[in-house]
Structure formats: C-alpha cells, structure tokens
Image (tube, rainbow, N blue to C red):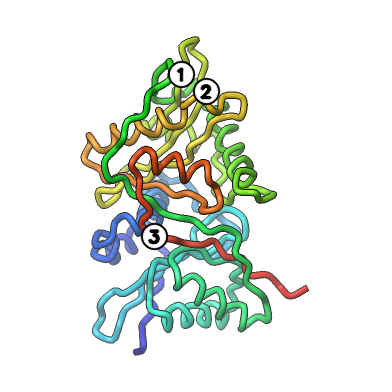
Amino acid sequence: MAHDLEFFDDPGAFLSAATELLAARPVESTVMATVTERLRSERAAGLPDPTGFPLWWLLVRDGGGSVVGAAMRTAPFGNHPAYLLGMPATAARDLARVLHDRGEELAGVNGALPAAEVCAAETAALTGATVRVAEHTRLHVLDVLREPVPPAGRARHARAAEVDQVVAWYGAFGRDAAEQAGRSGAHPGPEEDRDSMLRQIADGTVWVWEDETGTVVHLTAANRPMFGVSRIGPVYTPKEHRGRGYAAATVAAVSRTLVAEGAQVCLFTEQANPVSNALYERLGYRPLVDQANLVIEPVS
C-alpha cells in the first residue's frame, strides 16, 4: 500500500495534526509529544530553535488519509538522529529514500521497532554504510506503586540556587549510565544549559533527595504530562551516595505525586543496565515496549 509522507516545520502545527495519533497511544508517544511541546513553547516564548541539522516532523498517512505513523528530527545532540514511532515498513523505507533524495544525511535513527531498524537499514543500503546498535532501550509504565522503605531525609523540588549542581548531574548521568551498561562514552541525550535548567526548576519538574544533614544526594526529573502521561528521567545518584535507597525513594515520591495529579507515569531504561531495570521492577513498573538507538556509519 502506498503511503503519503507529510512533513512539518512547525511544532504547533504538527501537534494539532497528530493529536489523534499521539492521544491514542500516549505512553508509546511520550518522547515525541513532550519534545514537540517543549519546542512549541520555546518558540512561543521567542527562544531560538536548535541549529546545525534539519529540523522537521512527519506524519504518515495511508491511502484513505488516516494517520498510521509519525517521526521527527529534533535531537540537538550527537548525530541528530531521527525518532520514529511505529509505522508500516514500506513507510519507514520511503522515509529513508525521501531524506536521501533531498540530500539529507541521516547518521542515526532511534525509536520504535521494527520501524527504526527498517529506516536505518534502508539508509545504510542507499549510502553504502552499516548499522550499529548503540543502545537497546525499554519503556516501562507504572502499574501500582510499591513503596520502598525510605532512607533518612526527604524528597523536595530543586531550588534555583542549586542549578549549577543540577546541570552538572545531568551531564554526569549520561556518562555513568553508559558505564553501568558496560559501554564507553555517554548515554546520548540533550545537554541542558543553565538557562534551560532554570526554566525546568521553575516549572517544578526537578526533584532532589535531601539527607538528614541537609545535603542534596540525588536528582530525579520528569516531564509535564502530555496526553495524560508524564515521563520520569533522568534519575541520578552520584557514586559516593549510591546504595542507600535514595533513587528508589525519590522515584517513588515523584511517581506518587504525578499519579495524585492524575497522570499515568512511565520511564525508560537501557536494557543492558541491570541496576535500573531491577530498581523500577521493585517499584511496580512493568516493561511495555522495546526501542533502539541505531547508528549509521560509513564502511571503513
């Protein structure tokens, strides 16, 4: 079956056109929904778009005009991978061909399987490259929260005066997550600057655990709900404070707060990281869908 690929360069227009698709599967669509809403709100506030790569959103329509898939290229980090939701294999191949025909270099594809694999494989075939799996990720959704025994201290919102520490921990999270999964380098993700982090702190989406001495020992963040779903992450404890239950207690506190506000809660883990997968299972999260981060590399 032939599919139409409809590209957008405006996040607000895309959200309006994609509402039915995103709302129908809000947990699986959490990344696309929250990233797009963030860019929409930043544009509305007069903030600049990320630069250095083609910025677009895509809807896939079947012959009857129904939306059957979506993709975006918005990642301001690494090789600026495209991100795909589920779509027919023919549409994923067509996307790779359209990007190739218009001269857009695509060096990475993330997202739903098998669509991301099909798009990456077709891109590699068109360019004489190879595909490497950088990460196998897993999306988990909270069923019923199982409260852990909390350590001494309390969860609270991060404060503006703590922004430099929060920014540093965001950066450390990527490196340490890769190390726990047995990889070198860093877990791919956006590099938050001081201004963007101050906005998130002001929005109340960054929490910390403060121990009994008043020392901040852990960080957990979350996205504001989109289509009724809030995604937790990153979750970071510095090495010197690990093994004391701070991550479990803070994630539980944030999860409890979000559920009380009416949100369904989800989070991602890297499948190769046994620490985080075991932690979230204990708290009542269950695996929902597997995804992958794929790198398209020239043959050496």
Residue where numbered disc 1 is placed: 210
| Left or right: 95 as drawn, with respect to 108 | left
Query: Residue tagged by mark 3?
Result: 289
Indicate which disc, 3 or 1, sits on the residue closer to the N terminus: 1
Say if mark 3 contacts mark 1, CB within 8 Å: no
Q: Which residue is mark 2?
A: 217
Q: Secondary structure at mark 3?
A: strand
Q: Is residue 53 left or right of residue 88?
A: right
User: Which of the two residues, 101 or 172, is positioned nearer the viewer here?
Assistant: 172
Residue drawn at point x = 52 percent, y = 23 percent: 217
Q: Name the residue located 45 percent from the left edge and 72 percent from the top edge.
A: 114
Q: Are marks 2 and 1 in contact (CB under 8 Å)?
A: yes
Q: Are marks 2 and 3 in contact (CB under 8 Å)?
A: no
The residue lying furthest to the right in this view is: 300
Distance, label 2 to label 3, CA atoms, is 31 Å
Q: Nearer the viewer, mark 3 or mark 1?
A: 3
Near mark 2 (Cα within 10 A), the count class, few <14, some 14-19 or many ≥20, is: some
Q: Amino acid at mark 1?
A: Glu
Task: Give the residue type that dot 2 points to.
Answer: Val
How far apart are the two marked residues, 2 and 1, measured between alpha carbons?
A: 6 Å
* Nearest to the observer: residue 48 or residue 163: 163
- Quadrant placement of the C terminus: bottom right
User: Residue 213 placed where, x, y %?
Assistant: 50, 10
Residue 126 is left or right of residue 39, and the answer is: right
Query: How many badges with numbers are in the image?
Result: 3
